[in-house]
Image (spheres, rainbow, N blue to C red):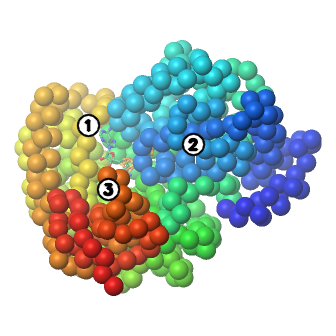
């Protein structure tokens, strides 16, 4: 990612009257420069700045992608706002569970209402849902007012596709089946000044039998370490103190690089970056978590005391059907090893209830795991059937009522253990990275401990982005209320 001035210098040199360059990222710079003219013309016609809004559904990887969309939108001259009643609206979609899809269709109905009143409005859709052919069919049929659709593999082409919406009438659709391309050095506009996500890899090769992500995000590919380090160094120079390294399975980072490198080795390199204070990462697949990684985490001053280690199920039989490639015993042994080596670490997890063939006894086994591992937090999901995945074709789908009962039983135990775990630090003084003014009480700040627990305490906005010492006075279930100490 270039700094603004450098990018402007490069844009200066581009001749938009000639043909578009073939090579990236120059090709996209060409289209940024071209789109600026269209946006300026439209803005002059309207007699006001043009506005744009991005909406993100889904995971942190999508959130990071949306920062890339905002980077382009700002570069071509849109004023980016939070309101969906804007001149350009883009939904970055998720399809991991059906409720994510339903929310997108619901919001599209609302956008149609806005577009009727603002006929120049442009509506775009991108992200994981768009990689599903059935979704594209549905939009072509029932949501004709959409102007632009693209997928996860060609998001780097956003500037080019934006131009196409100015130059074409009707719906522009560009979906790729897969890619081995990683385009560097495109503009990105971070949501927070002091923390940032950083992609270290894209895609997933694991094909857990319930999961659609490998189908919509393609095969695993790692970014080169030097590109990752350079990006973080630039962010730190720009005020970032905490990075979150992002990948569907960070533990298999680097396997397909020309010069292979492990995730633990990458972490050691990131640790060396001066001025960077905290390192987080997401997500770790238990099957690939190495002793080397535990060792690096244990000895690190910067890696946060938090590991998200998705369990999915505590029953070996279900884990096998899920294609998770570990047993209940292997997971438990791993979790215990981590707790022993790094005693103050917070372990969090993801759990699915209602996978095909799951019995109440399997749910008992999952609940027992929660009790034994004592998760600091767990995200619990009701199984959602995703067309095209192996699990969707399984015959023994569990009746809704039974799933609901299992889910409620599990949730109760998850909440009990999380409360106990979070309360362990009551009375201690710990480092907090201040993130924002408290949403409900303007006299309070909200920040995070290294172990990811939220803390609220009195203070003013000048501390946002700083790491301060806070006494954890009262534990309120999942968060603390405290006060700052010198
Ligand atoms: N790559 C990450 C997870 C990405 S999806 C990992 O393997 O850990 C985030 C979570 O959504 C998963 O951990 C899983 O718990 C949940 N999930 C995925 N597919 C699902 C489905 N079909 N139904 C319900 N939950 C699902
Ligand atoms: Fe989905 Fe499994 Fe890949 Fe995670 S590791 S994204 S759950 S297939
Ligand atoms: Fe959803 Fe795609 Fe992330 S399906 S969870 S946004 S990778």
Q: Nearer the viewer, residue 466 or 311?
A: 466
The residue at the point 33 percent across, 85 percent down is 486
The residue at the point 42 percent across, 48 percent down is 59
Residue 301, position in %: x, y?
A: 39, 82
Circle 1 sits on which residue? Answer: 383
Residue 142, position in %: x, y?
A: 51, 15
Judged from the image, the secondary structure of the residue bearing numbered disc 1 is: loop
The relative height of residue 95 versus residue 14 in the rendered view (above or below) is above
Q: Residues within 10 Å of mark 2 (few under 14, many from 20)?
A: few
Question: Marks 2 and 1: in contact by CB < 8 Å?
Answer: no
The relative height of residue 331 versus residue 214 in the rendered view (above or below) is below
Q: Residues within 10 Å of mark 3 (few under 14, many from 20)?
A: few
* Cα distance between the residues tagged 1 and 2: 35 Å
Residue 458, position in %: x, y?
A: 32, 68
User: What label does residue 81 carry, if any?
Assistant: 2
Circle 3 sits on which residue? Answer: 441
The answer to whether residue 190 is visible is yes
Q: Residues within 10 Å of mark 1 (few under 14, many from 20)?
A: many
Q: Nearer the viewer, residue 9 or 220?
A: 9
The residue at the point 17 percent across, 68 percent down is 474
Sequence-earlier tag: 1 or 3:
1
Q: Is the residue at mark 1 in contact range of ligand 1, meaning its CB lies under 8 Å from it? A: yes
């Amino acid at each position: 990612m270039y700094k603004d001035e450098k990018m402007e210098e490069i844009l200066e040199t581009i001749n938009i009257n000639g043909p578009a360059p073939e090579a990236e990222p120059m090709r996209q710079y060409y289209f940024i420069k071209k789109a600026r003219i269209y946006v300026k013309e439209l803005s002059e016609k309207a007699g006001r700045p043009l506005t744009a809004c991005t909406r993100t559904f889904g995971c942190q990887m999508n959130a990071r992608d949306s920062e890339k969309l905002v980077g382009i939108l700002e570069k071509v001259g849109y004023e980016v706002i939070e309101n969906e009643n804007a001149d350009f609206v883009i939904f970055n979609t998720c399809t991991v569970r059906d409720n994510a899809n339903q929310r997108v269709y619901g919001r599209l109905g609302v956008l149609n209402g806005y577009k009727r009143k603002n006929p120049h409005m442009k509506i775009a859709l991108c992200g994981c849902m768009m990689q599903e052919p059935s979704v594209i069919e549905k939009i072509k049929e029932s949501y004709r007012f959409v102007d632009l659709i693209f997928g996860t593999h060609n998001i780097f082409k956003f500037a080019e596709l934006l131009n196409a919406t100015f130059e074409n009438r009707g719906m522009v659709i560009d979906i790729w089946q897969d890619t081995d391309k990683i385009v560097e050095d495109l503009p990105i506009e971070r949501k927070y000044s002091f923390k940032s996500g950083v992609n270290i890899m894209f895609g997933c090769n694991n094909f857990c039998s319930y999961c659609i992500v490998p189908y919509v995000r393609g095969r695993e590919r790692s970014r080169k370490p030097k590109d990752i380090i350079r990006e973080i160094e630039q962010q730190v120079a720009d005020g970032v103190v905490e990075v979150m390294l992002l990948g569907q399975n960070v533990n298999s980072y680097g396997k397909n690089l020309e010069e292979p490198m492990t995730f633990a080795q990458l972490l050691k390199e990131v640790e060396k970056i001066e001025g960077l204070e905290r390192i987080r990462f997401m997500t770790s697949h238990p099957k690939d978590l190495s002793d080397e990684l535990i060792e690096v985490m244990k000895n690190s001053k910067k890696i946060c005391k938090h590991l998200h280690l998705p369990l999915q199920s505590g029953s070996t039989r279900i884990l096998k059907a899920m294609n998770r490639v570990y047993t209940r015993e292997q997971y438990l042994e791993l979790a215990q090893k981590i707790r022993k080596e790094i005693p103050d670490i917070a372990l969090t997890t993801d759990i699915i209830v209602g996978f095909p063939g799951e019995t109440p006894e399997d749910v008992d086994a999952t609940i027992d795991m929660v009790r034994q591992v004592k998760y600091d937090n767990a995200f619990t999901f009701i199984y959602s059937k995703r067309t095209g995945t192996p699990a969707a074709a399984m015959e023994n789908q569990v009746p809704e009522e039974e799933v609901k009962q299992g889910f409620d039983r599990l949730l109760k135990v998850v909440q009990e253990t999380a409360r106990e775990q979070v309360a362990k630090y009551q009375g201690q003084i710990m480092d907090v990275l201040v993130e924002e003014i408290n949403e409900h009480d303007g006299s309070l700040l909200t920040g995070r401990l290294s172990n990811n627990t939220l803390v609220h305490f009195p203070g003013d906005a000048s501390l946002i982005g700083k790491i301060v010492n806070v006494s954890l006075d009262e534990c309120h279930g999942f968060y603390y209320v405290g006060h700052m100490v010198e």
